[in-house]
Amino acid sequence: MMLQRMRSFVRSERGVISVEAIMILPILIWAFIGSFTIFEAFRQRSISLKATYAIADMLSRQVDAVGPDDIDGLNEVFAYLTFARDPAWIRVTSVYWDSVQNKFRRQWSDSTGEYVALTDDTLQPMAQYIPAMATGDTVLLVESYLPFKPVFDMGLESLTRAQSGWTRHVIVTRPRFASQVIFDPSS
């Protein structure tokens, strides 16, 4: 009798769905949260890139001199467009080609936050972003950074650092209505 009940218990398939659900539910929850986190990371990257293009386009249309207050204001616009929860920064540099020294040079540079303006020496690693230019041409190099902090810790913490480049963008644009954008440090 006892042996027959044990065989019946072993062969019974009642409750299998509950056991399978308990085993698979954590994996499903992890997959859902992971999908949400990765989607959010790509969404934030896309928003940051679009906002950087908008800032670069606004600057390229300037005919009057810009100053530190203007750059700070553009940083506020960038933070607004990206729904920034943490401090974001932008750096704007006017660049020209020096055919005598055969390298890119800066006319002016200004940044927000704790990041410093570019110098001629710190500009050279950025040359990979700048297209070939004729002598006398100028371009605006607009950099932005938006910290990304995932809602759930899914192994994306490396994307939160500025060095990762995940939400750090560099846009190069030519001035549209003038030969160059002038910088006035007093305004």
Image (cartoon, rainbow, N blue to C red):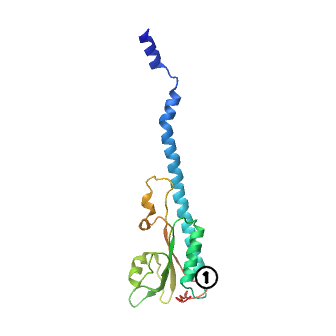
Residue in the foreground of this view, choosing between 23 and 151: 151
The quarter holding residue 127 reads bottom left
Please indicate whether residue 7 sits to the left or right of residue 66 in the image: left
- Locate residue 79, reporting x and y percent: 56, 70
Q: Quadrant of the N terminus?
A: top left
Q: Quadrant of the C terminus?
A: bottom right
- Locate residue 81, reporting x and y percent: 60, 68
Residue in the foreground of this view, choosing between 128 and 16: 16
- Locate residue 153, reporting x and y percent: 46, 53
Q: Is residue 156 above or below residue 147?
A: above
Please indicate whether residue 120 sits to the left or right of residue 20 in the image: left
Per the image, label 1 sits on a secondary structure element best described as: loop
- Circle 1: residue type: Arg
Q: Give the residue displayed 60% in from the left and 69% down from the top.
A: 80
Q: Is residue 144 above or below residue 99?
A: above
Disc 1 residue crowd, few under 14, some 14–19, many 20+, Cα 10 Å:
some
Residue that numbered label 1 is attached to: 61
- Locate residue 23, reporting x and y percent: 47, 35
Residue in the foreground of this view, choosing between 114 and 44: 114
Q: Give the residue displayed 57% in from the left and 75% down from the top.
A: 55
Q: Is residue 113 above or below residue 14?
A: below
Q: Is residue 185 above or below residue 38?
A: below
Q: How many marks overall?
A: 1
- Looking at this view, name the residue that lies furthest to the top: 1
Q: Give the residue displayed 40% in from the left and 84% down from the top.
A: 120
Please indicate whether residue 122 sits to the left or right of residue 85 in the image: left
